[in-house]
Amino acid sequence: MLKIRNAVKEDVPRIMEIYCYAQEFMIKCGNPTQWGHSYPTRELIDRDILNQACKVVYDETGIHGVVALYEGIDPTYVHIEDGSWLNNDPYITIHRIASDGRVHGVFKTVADYCKNMIDNVKLDTHANNLIMQSLIAKNGFTRCGIIHVDDGSPRIAYQWSKR
């Protein structure tokens, strides 16, 4: 059974391995520009750990996934185009989710963890990330519109709401 805990500094080598695997996987699956070979950076991961936003997904055999979870307003989600959010209630945001490809259910574990924390969960993904879009839909999220990340590039935005 997969569990989630806060990441610690000692997890960074494994976290970096998982992100490297995810980068290669996305490139092979037709999504070469979302992360490329350079995102997320070690500095970003260190900051997420310091802020207790970085979580690892693990079982008795080790760490199989990583995610950054943010509570509160996400500045890139303030403006949405071609649609609207389901509501403006408080939410948690899922960012930078990745798995090592060895176990199934990392996304579902993270989604369920968030759904048990709060009544609204938001996330986004690149238009070329078809696998993630499928996982998002299978886990009950609604496509809400288009947001733009810090570099200005568009992302498909989703929300799950308990209501």
Image (cartoon, rainbow, N blue to C red):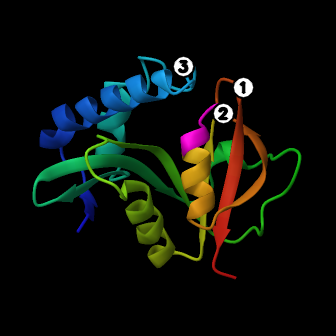
| Residue 146, visible in the rendered structure | yes
Front residue of 20 and 52: 20
Front residue of 105 and 10: 105
Q: Amino acid at mark 2?
A: Val
- The residue that label 2 is drawn on is 149
Q: Secondary structure at mark 3?
A: loop
Q: Which residues are magenta?
A: 127-131
Which residue: 50% across, 46% down? 95
Q: Amino acid at mark 1?
A: Gly
Find residue 130 and report its horizontal and vertical position in percent: 61, 39
Find residue 146 and report its horizontal and vertical position in percent: 78, 42
Circle 1 residues within 10 Å: few <14, some 14–19, many ≥20: few
- Foreground: disc 2 or disc 3: 3
Residue 32: which numbered mark, if any?
3
Find residue 82 and report its horizontal and vertical position in percent: 89, 46
Residue 49: which numbered mark, if any?
none
Mark 3 or mark 1, which has the lower sequence index?
3
- Foreground: disc 3 or disc 1: 3
Left or right: 153 with respect to 140? right
Front residue of 152 and 61: 61
| In the rendered image, the vertical position of residue 20 relative to residue 127, given as above or below | above
Residue 152: which numbered mark, if any?
1
| Residue 50, visible in the rendered structure | no
